Amino acid sequence: MLNNKNKNQRAIHADLVVNNEPVTIQGQGNGPISALIDAISKKFGTLLEVKDYTEHSLGSGTEVKAATYVHLGYIDANGEKLSKWGVGIDTDVSESSLKAIVSVVNQLVAAKEITL
């Protein structure tokens, strides 16, 4: 859930499932993407940053979906700067952006590059 704290700040509170365990995250930022990045970074103890972001529509009409591609940078356990791409698709562009970020986090968790 995204909440407006003020004009320039957003807060996010989300319930996730990580390795079959319920996890609650909370963060703040200047928009939904930065708020989710903040929440995930705090919970997993790793700095994530958006290196690149792009989106486009899939089709046309009133039920068109947005495809969002997010390139996230992070630092692994050895201190190396690495990055991964994620993609999200939804009829709501904000939702597709958040799904793209979760896609990257899912990859990092599956590869045991980040843990709770």
Image (tube, rainbow, N blue to C red):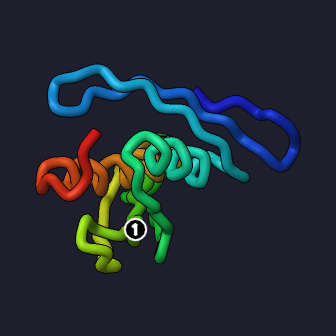
In the displayed structure image, the side of residue 90 where residue 112 appears, left or right: left
Q: Is residue 8 depicted above or below 19 in this figure?
A: below
Q: Indicate the quadrant containing the C terminus: top left, top right, bottom left or bottom right.
A: top left
From where the camera sits, is residue 57 visible?
no
Residue farthest toward the front in the current orientation of the protein: 78
Neighbour class for label 1 at 10 Å: few (<14), some, many (≥20)?
many
User: Residue, x 34% and y 47% (percent of image)?
Assistant: 102
Residue 86: image x %, image y %?
Answer: 31, 61
Residue farthest toward the right in the current orientation of the protein: 7
User: Residue, x 46% and y 61% (percent of image)?
Assistant: 47
Q: Amino acid at mark 1?
A: Leu
Residue 7: image x %, image y %?
Answer: 87, 44
Q: Which is nearer the eye, 88 or 112?
A: 112
User: Residue, x 35% and y 28% (percent of image)?
Assistant: 16
In the displayed structure image, the side of residue 31 where residue 13 appears, left or right: left
User: Residue, x 20% and y 48% (percent of image)?
Assistant: 109
Residue 67: image x %, image y %?
Answer: 39, 58
Circle 1: element type = strand
Residue 48: image x %, image y %?
Answer: 45, 62
Q: Indicate the quadrant containing the N terminus: top left, top right, bottom left or bottom right.
A: top right
Q: Quadrant of residue 104?
A: bottom left
Residue farthest toward the left in the current orientation of the protein: 111
- The residue tagged 1 is 72
From where the camera sits, is residue 45 visible?
yes
